Amino acid sequence: MEVPFINFEPMHNEIRDEIIEAFKKVYDRNWFILGESVEKFEKNFLKFCNTDYCISCGNGLDALCLILRGYDIGVGDEVIVPSNTYIATALAVSNVGAKVVLVEPDIKTFNIDVNKIEEAITKRTKAIIAVHLYGRPVEVDKVRVLCEKYNLKFIEDAAQAHGAIYKGEKIGSLGDAAGFSFYPGKNLGALGDGGAILTSDIVLAQKVRALRNYGSNIKYHNEYKGVNSRLDEIQAEFLIVKLRYLYKWNNERQKIARLYIERINNSKLILPDLNLVKESVWHVFPLRTECRNELKQYLKDKGIGTLIHYPIPIHLQKAYKDLGYKLGDFPIAEEISTTVLSLPMWYGMSEDEVNYVIDVLNQW
Ligand SMILES: *Cc1c(COP(=O)(O)O)cnc(C)c1O
């Protein structure tokens, strides 16, 4: 049996007619940038996340950059990010000219270790970007307390956590602002690139809305040196369709995750602790093992696709050699990068496919 790491086919077959209608709507309207579809999606998405403002943009990296620029964070400032996140979180900080300050994750949840944040805070620290990695909400309450104590902005990187819930509240409504990505592989994905900023801060919302469109709210009147980072009308219309299914698709991911956790039974594998990640929307299903590369090859030979999220931590990336770090500086991020492996996780996986993955892992 072949079980790919990801397969969009079942999801896209189910919504095929609606997506084609969405395409026709925009095509026949002949209005492609910043129009009624973008407005409607922004309204739907802010309602979904239960916050006040939604400003869509070109991608998730831009969403984070725009938030930082909106808060005037730049050269001379420091921003805290987890040492094991996807590179985009750090790039957002670098792209606005601020310094990336890495804080280790908790090896059980893979999310930033809230007990290690305080020692990384300096006079220059302006914000914490808390990443809900793999779809798992971070310990929001503890991040909030620190942000209040030190007067920092609490920015959520929610690129992997559309629809996740923390103590009854939606991810994206928990900090000062949140950045989302609609890259096709995310839990809510466009058919191309896309992103959004959510916030309840009206000042930030107005500034970011201008920044994404050349720094202009009124055509040809430019208040800021902005960028061009907009969600296309066509992608917005696709996202309006897909948002309606997000609960269903996330539920299915949660069902698959529960089956994996309940039935994978192999002492060589460290599985997620369901009690710690109950509200995860399982953007990926990670497990850990000392013999990760062997396991990856074994699964490949059995027709099962896997990926590593992520094989090289930020401090060991060539792009960040200016930070001056070496192997051993962030041991937990390094440990995760050498032991973590993500199993197939997509809407429409059949019971047979899930059981096959489980059986093959149990026979290893
Ligand atoms: C995908 C992702 C981003 C960036 O989103 P893009 O739309 O690809 O630019 C940022 N942060 C995290 C954690 C992500 O997974």
Image (cartoon, rainbow, N blue to C red):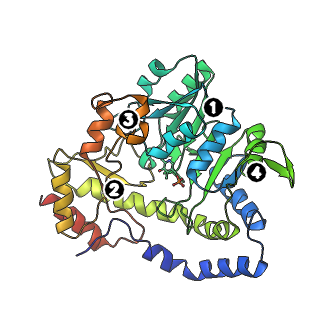
Task: Tell me where residue 195 sits by quadrant.
Answer: bottom right
Q: Mark 4 against mark 2, which lies toward the viewer? A: 4
The residue where tag 3 is placed is: 315
Q: Which mark is residue 111?
A: none
Rendered location of residue 75, percent (x, y):
61, 29
The residue where tag 2 is placed is: 258
Mark 3 vs mark 4, CA separation in Å: 33 Å
Marks 1 and 2, the one that precedes in the sequence: 1
Mark 1 vs mark 4, CA separation in Å: 18 Å
**For this rendering, which residue is in front, 330 or 135?**
330
For image coordinates 66% across by 47% down, the residue present is 198
Identity of the amino acid at label 4? Tyr
Mark 3 vs mark 2, CA separation in Å: 33 Å
Q: Which mark is residue 74?
A: 1
Mark 1 vs mark 2, CA separation in Å: 42 Å
Give the SS element for disc 4.
loop
Question: Is the residue at mark 2 in contact range of ligand 1, meaning its CB lies under 8 Å from it?
Answer: no
Classify mark 2: residues with Cα within 10 Å, few (<14), some (14-19) or many (20+): some
The residue where tag 4 is placed is: 214
Task: Tell me where residue 64 sits by quadrant.
Answer: top right
Rendered location of residue 60, percent (x, y):
57, 51
Q: Is residue 15 above or below residue 100?
A: below
Identity of the amino acid at label 1? Gly
For image coordinates 44% across by 49% down, the residue present is 280
Mark 3 vs mark 1, CA separation in Å: 20 Å
**For this rendering, which residue is in front, 350 or 262?**
350
Do the residues under discs 4 and 2 have CB atoms within 8 angstroms? no
**For this rendering, which residue is in front, 348 or 130?**
130
